[in-house]
């Protein structure tokens, strides 16, 4: 079967010729139509009134001839009725707004408006004749009304088609051809789209495609309805440039199946949002709402365990570090919904803290929940300890971290200090302040990492594990836990906002490698599971969230482009670009980036009371041993001894193998010996 491009090349000239032939209108008629369309609005209205008067009088004459005979039209009674009919009908038409409708853009609704106005006018005309003593039969009235309606609405319909053909022929004179499309979906959205497209000459709707076998062979808006199975045969006789997908109510999974099937047959497909979505400004939200993202990832929604959600939050004082970040801010939103006594949001960035403050103050119930917004760094041990003690914190969610792999890879010491020392300070502050629950938000990049960010997060996990064991031995009942999960869609640094911006700019969409895969979940789902996992923490447990199946980044790029209503193409190995609206370009793996991620270091993993949360027992260091490691690491960072820094990381982080020699940004060159 020919592809859409091949069809265009093979049938383009014939189709263009057929279109021109079918649309041919004499030059004289074109001049007349063009002259009429250039009249002022007032003159157009006067012309329509004159035309309606003539049509009404003609309908009256025809009704008398058909009902009686030609002799009757010579009677005074006929002449009186003939003159009275337009005198009544034209003012009624004017009152009903019939003359305010532009003929070129009139549609079926105008027929109903004309019918209503004409019915009112005929009844009024009939009553006047009765009051004036003129004899008129009811059958004559009905016949006159029918003929008047058919002539007035018919002339307008013909005029609209003639005007439209003149405009289309003028368009064809300036352009090679009209674009021919089929609309997938014969429902309300598809019909609305067809009506909207018919207003302009650029696109010709050839047919509707619908899965409903009962619609096969029917006509909608003068267009045939065919089944998807008929499309190949139909395309062989018609040049179909594109298929417009117009079923906004269908699930994303089904939508993608249909689009991919059509594309596999060689058709260009565009996803068209519903007219109501466009009017309400919900188009972008509809593309990436959580339900749709869940379908992209093949994930099913799981109802949260309400007991786990509330266990560490309801009625308690809660601290969230990194509260302005993607996970920290979502944690804060969900925590407020669980009715804590007090929420302290601790954030380094003034801008992010301001944004989350403005949002939460609007949504928090006034007076019921105390909100405290603290600007500070987790590297300031004294200050964070003061915050924990002052606000009598019960539960800490430690989400503060530098997490962007390429940035941390080029700023090694800053990243290590923030992620490792910051976690140490927060955990020690929790111990000193009598906190009951401490939850570290970790990442799958901590498992056999190839980058500094992942290594720093694994070291942070070791810190929490060691302090938890130390406090357990000392009889301190504080519950430490670690929650490890993969990427969250929509977070800063995630592919979703990056791809959104690239699609908005018209491409290209950049993917590092065609085979790169990642685990994904939505931000709200991740935050909810963090809260629930933290409620099950006991002795430095590592909780691993069920991320589902890993997803190819390339597949996400393709689906997002399709959801935006564009076609996509991938640069071929020889560098050539496929013909498409938006190109996908591979840029190569970034420093420290892996093709795939893992969630577990060892195999010792078991279930919990939540179906999407697993508990792993993994290797750890004693507090005594870890103290030595941290002191050695701190000394190496103080003198910027990168060789020593990476030796320490490789020795203590399972499977850590740096992908490249890191760069010292102060020296502007590699600073790690071979």
Image (cartoon, rainbow, N blue to C red):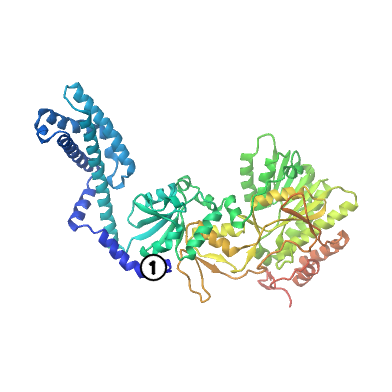
**Residue 265 horizontal/vertical position (percent):** 47, 65
Which residue occupies the extreme right position in the image? 474
Name the foreground residue: 191 vs 212. Answer: 212
**The image quarter in which residue 334 lies:** top right
Above or below for 358 versus 473 = above
What residue is rendered at 60% in x and 55% in y? 490
Q: How many marks?
A: 1
Name the foreground residue: 201 vs 374. Answer: 201
What residue is rendered at 66% in x and 64% in y? 405
**Residue 498 horizontal/vertical position (percent):** 57, 59
SS under mark 1: helix
Left or right: residue 592 compared with residue 83: right
Name the foreground residue: 72 vs 244. Answer: 72
What residue is rendered at 57% in x and 66% in y? 511
User: Badge 1 local density, few (<14 within 10 Å), some, or many (20+)?
Assistant: many
**The image quarter in which residue 402 lies:** bottom right
Circle 1 is placed at which residue position?
Answer: 7
Left or right: residue 80 compared with residue 419: left
| Picture quarter with the C terminus | bottom right
Left or right: residue 11 compared with residue 57: right
Above or below for 158 versus 46 = below
What residue is rendered at 22% in x and 27% in y? 126
Determine if residue 426 is in view: yes
| Picture quarter with the N terminus | bottom left
**Residue 491 horizontal/vertical position (percent):** 62, 55
Determine if residue 90 is in view: no
Name the foreground residue: 421 vs 70. Answer: 70
């Amino acid at each position: 079967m020919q592809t859409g491009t091949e069809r265009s090349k093979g049938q383009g000239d014939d189709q263009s010729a057929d279109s021109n032939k079918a649309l041919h209108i004499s030059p004289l008629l074109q001049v007349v139509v063009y002259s009429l369309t250039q009249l002022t609005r007032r003159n157009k209205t006067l012309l329509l009134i004159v035309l309606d008067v003539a049509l009404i009088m003609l309908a009256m004459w025809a009704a008398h001839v058909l009902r009686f005979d030609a002799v009757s039209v010579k009677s005074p009674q006929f002449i009186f009725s003939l003159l009275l009919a337009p005198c009544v009908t034209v003012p009624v038409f004017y009152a009903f707004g019939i003359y305010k409708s532009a003929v070129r853009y009139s549609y079926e609704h105008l027929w109903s408006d004309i019918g209503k106005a004409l019915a009112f006018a005929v009844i009024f005309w009939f009553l006047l004749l009765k009051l004036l003593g003129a004899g008129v039969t009811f059958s004559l009235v009905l016949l006159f009304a029918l003929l008047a309606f058919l002539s007035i609405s018919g002339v307008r319909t013909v005029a609209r088609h003639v005007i439209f053909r003149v405009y289309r022929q003028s368009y064809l004179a300036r352009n090679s051809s009209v674009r021919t499309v089929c609309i997938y979906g014969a429902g309300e959205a598809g019909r609305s789209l067809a009506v909207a497209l018919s207003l302009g000459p650029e696109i010709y709707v050839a047919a509707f495609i619908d899965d409903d076998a009962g619609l096969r062979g029917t006509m909608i808006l003068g267009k045939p309805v065919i089944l998807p199975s008929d499309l190949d045969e139909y395309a062989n006789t018609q040049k179909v440039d594109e298929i417009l997908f117009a079923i906004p109510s269908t699930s994303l999974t089904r939508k993608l199946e249909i689009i991919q099937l059509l594309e596999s047959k060689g058709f260009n497909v565009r996803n068209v949002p519903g007219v109501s979505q466009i009017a309400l400004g919900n188009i972008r939200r509809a593309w990436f709402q959580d339900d749709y993202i869940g379908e992209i990832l093949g994930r099913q929604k799981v109802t949260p365990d309400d007991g786990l959600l509330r266990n560490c939050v309801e009625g308690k004082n809660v601290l969230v570090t990194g509260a302005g970040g993607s996970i920290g801010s979502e944690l804060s939103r969900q925590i407020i919904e669980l009715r804590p006594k007090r929420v302290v949001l601790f954030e380094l960035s003034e801008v992010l803290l301001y944004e989350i403050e403005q949002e939460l103050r609007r949504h928090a119930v006034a007076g019921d929940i105390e909100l405290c917004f603290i600007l500070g760094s987790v590297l300031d041990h004294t200050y964070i300890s003061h915050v924990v003690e002052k606000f009598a914190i019960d539960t800490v969610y430690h989400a503060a971290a530098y997490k962007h792999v390429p940035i941390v890879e080029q700023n090694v010491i800053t990243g290590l200090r923030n992620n490792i020392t910051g976690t140490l300070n927060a955990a020690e502050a929790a111990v000193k302040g009598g906190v009951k629950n401490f939850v570290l938000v970790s990442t799958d990049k901590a498992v056999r990492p190839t980058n500094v960010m992942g290594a720093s997060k694994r070291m942070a996990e070791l810190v929490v594990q060691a302090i938890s064991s130390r406090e357990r031995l000392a009889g301190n009942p504080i519950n430490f836990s670690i929650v490890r999960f993969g990427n969250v869609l929509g977070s800063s640094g995630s592919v979703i906002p990056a791809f959104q911006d690239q699609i908005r700019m018209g491409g290209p969409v950049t993917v590092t490698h065609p085979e790169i895969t990642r685990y994904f979940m939505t931000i709200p789902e991740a935050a909810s599971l963090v809260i629930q996992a933290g409620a099950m923490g006991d002795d430095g447990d590592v909780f691993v969230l069920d991320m589902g199946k890993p997803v190819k980044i390339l597949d996400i790029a393709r689906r997002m482009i399709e959801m935006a209503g564009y076609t996509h193409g991938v640069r071929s190995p020889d560098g050539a670009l496929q013909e498409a609206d938006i190109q996908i370009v591979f840029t190569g793996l970034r420093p420290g980036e892996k093709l795939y991620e893992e969630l577990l270091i060892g195999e010792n993993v078991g279930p919990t009371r939540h179906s999407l949360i697993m508990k792993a027992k993994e290797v750890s260091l004693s507090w005594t041993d870890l103290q030595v490691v941290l002191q050695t690491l701190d000394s190496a960072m103080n003198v910027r001894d990168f060789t020593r820094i990476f030796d320490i990381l490789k020795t203590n982080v399972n499977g850590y193998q740096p992908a490249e020699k890191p760069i010292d940004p102060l020296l502007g060159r590699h600073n790690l010996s071979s």
